[in-house]
């Protein structure tokens, strides 16, 4: 008989952490391959199809980048919260509320010159996401409500608010639940590679800005110190409640920008399916990247390859659409499980 003993590690090197993370991803892909095999498809052929469909042509590459844009925004949204040890599970709802908030201006506001119109829409999308994130922030600060529960439940509320408008006053002329197409002034510029649009530039600029803010400014120091130790933060004179509220606002604003990127850069209208679970996938992106803004871009591209490839598997190999979701879920569980090996030495002792 053996018993398992866990010994706390004093320090984990960056190299060891990377090896453990990559091993976890590899295990998740093996399990995904087994799932694919149970559906009667050769997993090696399926994974090759994923890679070639996402990266094997200019169209595939452009669509992969397109899918990565909202993932960068939502990954950043979750990451900045994680830096302060806060869990924002509500990026999906903040995405929808930001998109709805911006759409309201497009539907009822004046038609402005394109640069000004886009600027207003982008700002309103960020404001909408921030407003929606302020609700769980206030619930946590005033009533100590767990933010995981509140942000998760508010996702459904935000989506249903969008549905109210889509099935009501904003319903299209053909009686389907989507708005009329946006005017040219409300559409983001394309960058010359398929449907890749201005949202990519905005996302990459925010990656750099967020990195600078987190690691080279006083406010970033406060955010990180609050996340590492509340006692130390209080001792340093940091207002914990104000810091938490600010983190939620920034996080919600970033998620709201993902919604704007979808409606103004890709769809040119608001409808029920502007997001393929980007808010939830952003959690995986942020966790894989250890909340590092630059690494978020890498893992956003990695997961967008899986999303694009999963679409191809459904069409070419008649696999269920759930393959992509299952693969993402396995990666998330594998990464969560790998935390054990990052923090502890696991020993088997004979009794």
Image: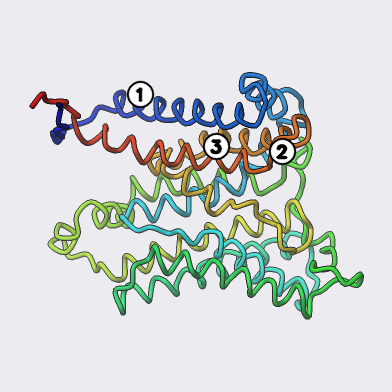
Give how far across and how far down residue 351 sits, in percent: 8, 27
User: Could you tell which of marks 1 and 2 lies nearer the N-terminus?
Assistant: 1
User: Please, is residue 179 above or below residue 283 in the view?
Assistant: below
Furthest-front residue in this view: 1
Q: Is residue 10 among the parts visible in the rendering?
A: no
Q: Is residue 278 above or below residue 296?
A: below
Query: How far across and how far down the image is residue 40, in percent?
Result: 67, 27
Earlier sequence position, callout 3 versus callout 1 = 1
Among the 4 quarters of the image, the one containing residue 310:
top right
Q: Quadrant of residue 87?
A: bottom left
Query: Sequence-wise, which precedes: disc 2 or disc 3?
Result: 2
270 with respect to 133 (left or right): right
Determine which residue is flagged by label 1. 19
Name the spot of residue 8 as percent of width and height, x first. 14, 36
Image-based side of 175 in relation to 251, left or right: right
As measured in the structure, the alpha-carbon distance from the residue carrying label 2 to the one carrying label 3 is 13 Å
Q: Which residue is mark 3?
A: 327
Which SS class for mark 1?
Answer: helix
Crowdedness near tag 2: few (<14), some (14–19) or many (≥20) residues, C-alpha within 10 Å: many
For label 3, count other residues whose C-alpha is less than 10 Å away and answer few (under 14), some (14-19) or many (20+). many
Question: In the current view of this chain or complex, which residue is farthest to the right?
Answer: 174
Between marks 1 and 2 in the image, the one whose residue lies nearer the viewer: 2
Q: Residue at x 55, y 37 (%)?
A: 327
Residue 311 disc label: 2
Which residue is painted at 73% across and 33% down in the image? 312
In the rendered image, residue 108, in percent from the top left (x then y), is placed at 77, 78
| Element marked by disc 3 | helix
């Amino acid at each position: 008989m053996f018993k398992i003993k866990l010994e706390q590690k004093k320090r984990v090197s960056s190299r060891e952490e990377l090896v453990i993370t990559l091993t976890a991803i590899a295990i998740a892909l093996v399990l995904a391959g087994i799932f694919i095999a149970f559906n009667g498809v050769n997993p090696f052929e399926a994974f090759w199809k994923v890679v070639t469909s996402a990266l094997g042509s200019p169209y595939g590459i452009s669509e992969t980048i397109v899918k990565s844009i909202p993932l960068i925004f939502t990954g950043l949204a979750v990451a900045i919260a994680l830096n302060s040890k806060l869990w924002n599970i509500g990026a999906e709802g903040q995405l929808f509320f930001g998109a709805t908030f911006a759409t309201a201006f497009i539907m009822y506001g004046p038609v402005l010159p394109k640069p000004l119109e886009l600027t207003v829409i982008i700002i309103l999308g960020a404001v909408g996401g921030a407003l929606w994130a302020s609700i769980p922030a206030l619930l946590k600060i005033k009533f100590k409500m767990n933010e995981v529960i509140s942000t998760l439940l508010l996702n459904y509320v935000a989506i249903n608010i969008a549905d109210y408008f889509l099935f009501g006053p904003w319903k299209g002329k053909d009686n389907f639940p989507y708005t009329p197409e946006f005017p040219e002034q409300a559409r983001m510029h394309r960058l010359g590679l398929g449907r890749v649009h201005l949202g990519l530039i905005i996302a990459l600029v925010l990656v750099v800005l967020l990195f600078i803010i987190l690691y080279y400014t006083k406010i970033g120091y406060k955010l990180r110190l609050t996340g590492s130790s509340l006692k130390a933060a209080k001792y340093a004179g940091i207002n914990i409640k104000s810091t938490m509220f600010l983190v939620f606002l920034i996080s919600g604003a970033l998620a709201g920008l993902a919604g704007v990127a979808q409606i103004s850069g890709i769809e040119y209208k608001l409808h029920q399916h502007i997001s393929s679970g980007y808010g939830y996938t952003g959690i995986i992106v942020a966790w894989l990247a250890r909340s590092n803004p630059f690494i978020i871009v890498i893992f956003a591209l990695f997961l967008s390859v899986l999303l694009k490839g999963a679409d191809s598997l459904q069409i070419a190999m008649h696999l269920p659409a759930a393959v992509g979701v299952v693969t993402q879920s396995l990666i998330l569980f594998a990464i969560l499980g790998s935390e054990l090996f990052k923090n502890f030495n696991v020993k088997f002792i004979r009794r």
